[in-house]
């Protein structure tokens, strides 16, 4: 099946271009600020559509691997349940051993980096 064109990310890019190039330059100062906030939200939505599912799946794989659970791809509840389990394990001190703590820390940092790549990639750029 041929995908629809333009797709959702393309529609967001087109709308953002019209807002940025045609509407905001002639808008009142207060509306320009609000328009910039809308542009930022549109950019986040575009990245979420393009990369959000893959980022969520990578986090789910990491959690499933950590707990040696079979991956139930397409089941977001697995991530929720394993995230709660990890939070409880951290709270209870079951992740305090040096090897376990390093593994959990690495897994959490990678999860945050995946989330930032979608919602605020500029932050990752400034970090290095």
Image (tube, grey):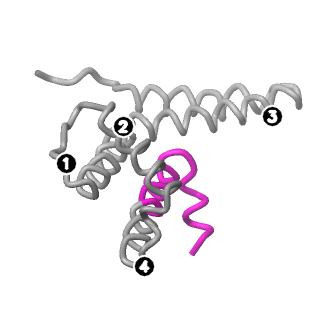
Q: Residue furthest left?
A: 1
User: Horizontal and vertical percent for residue 32?
Assistant: 80, 31
Local secondary structure at mark 2:
helix
Q: Are marks 1 and 3 in contact (CB under 8 Å)?
A: no
Q: Position of residue 65 (x, y in %)?
A: 23, 56
Chain-order first, disc 1 or disc 2? 1
Dot label at residue 98: 4
Q: In the picture provided, is 124 more to the left or to the right than 55?
A: right
Principal secondary structure, stretch drawn in magenta: helix
How far is mark 1 from mark 3, CA to CA? 47 Å
Nearest to viewer (mark 1 / mark 3): 1
Query: Mark 2 sits on what residue?
Result: 81
Tag 2 or tag 3, which sits nearer the N-term? Answer: 3
Residue at horizontal 19 percent and vertical 37 percent from the top:
72
Task: Mark 1 or mark 3: name the one nearer the start of the chain.
Answer: 3
Distance, label 3 to label 4, CA atoms, is 48 Å
- Disc 3 on helix, strand or loop? helix
Image point (44%, 71%), residue name: 101
Residue highlighted by disc 3: 33
Query: Which one is in front, 28 or 103?
Result: 103
The percent coordinates of residue 34 (x first, y second) are 77, 29
At a point 34% along the width and 26% down the height, the residue shown is 7
Element under label 1? loop
Q: Quadrant of the C terminus?
A: bottom right
Tell which circle, 1 or 4, labels the residue nearer the N-terminal end. Answer: 1
Q: Is residue 95 above or below residue 33?
A: below
Q: Which residue is mark 1?
A: 69
Disc 1 versus disc 2: distance between alpha carbons?
12 Å
Task: Name the image quarter holding residue 89.
Answer: bottom left
Q: Which residues are magenta?
A: 108-128
């Amino acid at each position: 099946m041929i995908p629809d064109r333009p797709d959702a990310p393309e529609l967001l890019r087109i709308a953002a271009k019209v807002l940025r190039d045609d509407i905001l330059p002639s808008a009142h100062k207060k509306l320009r600020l609000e328009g910039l906030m809308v542009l930022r939200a549109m950019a986040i939505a575009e990245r979420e559509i393009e990369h959000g599912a893959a980022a969520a799946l990578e986090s789910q794989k990491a959690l499933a691997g950590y707990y040696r659970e079979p991956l139930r791809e397409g089941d977001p509840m697995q991530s929720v349940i394993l995230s709660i389990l990890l939070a409880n394990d951290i709270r209870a001190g079951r992740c305090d051993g040096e090897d376990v703590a390093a593994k959990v820390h690495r897994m959490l940092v990678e999860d945050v980096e995946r989330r930032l790549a979608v919602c605020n990639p500029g932050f990752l750029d400034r970090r290095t």
